[in-house]
Amino acid sequence: MTPIKKTYEDSLWVTIYTDASGTGGWAAWIRCSVPPYKLQITGTHPYPNDSTAMEAYAILEAVKATLDQWSNVDGLRITTDSQSAIINLKRRHHKNKALRRIQNEFHLLTSRKWVKFVWKKGHCQDDSIQTWLNNWCDKNSKVVSNIE
């Protein structure tokens, strides 16, 4: 009997919101349709002098936490306010060593997953859930950098 191949529509998707601060912290809010339904994580990053690497590192750490929590996930919808992180994670062979290291690990983890990047303008004041989640990540990335 041939196994049924999953389609894009019937796959398990996780939505990830991330942000990093210039003061050394990052935060992510991760949502999934199966328990546990959400995961909130924060941490510090080793690249405090490179804003693109900081944002990309936040995405990488969120992807790692997602795959640890939901190993059977098929797709990742990653929302960030950093266009440069999106551009740099999509391309390969970056000259910046920190970004290249992040890219390589990101591509290794996501090579058999669907990945959709969504850019969300940062520091908005509308009433959307995307804005609320981006602001939560922004606030908590700053809080954690002052604690750790």
Image (tube, grey):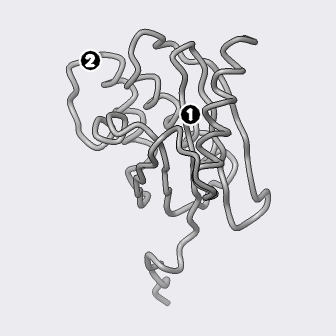
Residue 94 drawn at (x, y percent): 22, 26
Camera-side residue: 87 or 119? Answer: 119
Residue shown at the point (41%, 33%) measured from the top left: 105
Dot 1 surroundings within 10 Å: few (below 14), some, or many (20 or more)? many
Give amino acid for label 1: Glu
Residue shown at the point (57%, 50%) measured from the top left: 16
Residue shown at the point (75%, 12%) measured from the top left: 147
Kind of element beneath mark 2: loop
Residue 62 drawn at (x, y percent): 58, 39
Residue shown at the point (63%, 36%) measured from the top left: 137
Residue 9 drawn at (x, y percent): 48, 79
Please identify the residue farthest to the right as the structure is shown.
36
Circle 2 is placed at which residue position?
96
| In the rendered image, the vertical position of residue 44 relative to residue 87, given as above or below | above
Circle 1 is placed at which residue position?
61
73 left or right, relative to 110 = right
41 left or right, relative to 104 = right
Please identify the residue farthest to the front as the structure is shown.
125
Mark 1–mark 2 Cα distance, whole angstroms, equals: 19 Å
Q: In which quarter of the image is residue 98?
A: top left
